[in-house]
Image: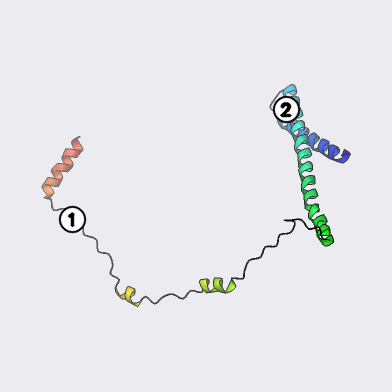
Amino acid sequence: MKGKILLSLLFGLLGFGFTFLTNYGHNLLGTSLIRGIIGFIVWFLLAFLLRWVLGFIIKQSGSPESGEAASAEGTEELGSKLDISTPGEDEELINLLKQKPEKASGDAEGFTPMQPPKLVSMKDPEELAKAVRHLKEE
C-alpha cells in the first residue's frame, strides 16, 4: 500500500509541476498555485485509480489459474473454461474469391450506346433576341 501511495504522490507532484508551469506565465502566482494544487489532486487520484484498476484486473486474470487447479481436483465450476472454435471454411472462401466470370455473349452484342435527343430550339432568332432584351431590361 505504501508503494501505491508513493507512486501516486510522484504522479501528483508531476501534475502539480506541469499545471503550475503552464499557468505561471499567463496568471498570477496565487491563481497558478491554486490550479497547480487542483492538478496535483487530479493526477494523484488518476494514478491511484489506475493502479487500483490494474491491480483488480491482474487479480482477476490470476483467478483462472486457480480455477485450473480446482478443476484438476474435480471441483470444476460452470463457466470457468470457454473453448470456442469455428469450422473450417477455407475451401468455400477460396471458391468465392475465384468466381469465374459468366459468359455474357448476348449482353455484349445487344449493347447500344445511348442517343439522347438533341436540344434544338425551334424558335425564331428574332423572338429569342427580343426575349433576351426583355430580360436584360429588368
Q: Residue at x 76, y 48 (%)?
A: 57
Which is closer to the viewer, label 1 or label 2? 2
In the picture provided, is 11 more to the left or to the right than 105?
right
Q: Residue at x 55, y 72 (%)?
A: 92
Q: Position of residue 97 (x, y in %)?
A: 52, 71
Name the colouring of the figure: rainbow
Which mark is on residue 35? 2
Quadrant of the image occupied by residue 74: bottom right
Q: Position of residue 73 (x, y in %)?
A: 84, 60
Quadrant of the image occupied by residue 137: top left
Q: Which residue ends up furthest to the front in the rendered image?
A: 74
Q: Which residue is mark 1?
A: 120
Q: Nearer the viewer, residue 119 or 86?
A: 86
Secondary structure of the residue carrying numbered label 1: loop
Instruction: Please rate how many residues cluster around mark 2, counting C-alpha atoms within 10 Å: few if below 14, some from 14 to 19, many from 20.
Output: some
Instruction: Please rate how many residues cluster around mark 1, counting C-alpha atoms within 10 Å: few if below 14, some from 14 to 19, many from 20.
Output: few
Q: Position of residue 48 (x, y in %)?
A: 79, 38
Q: Position of residue 79 (x, y in %)?
A: 72, 56
Query: Where, quadrant-wise, is the C terminus in this rendering?
Result: top left
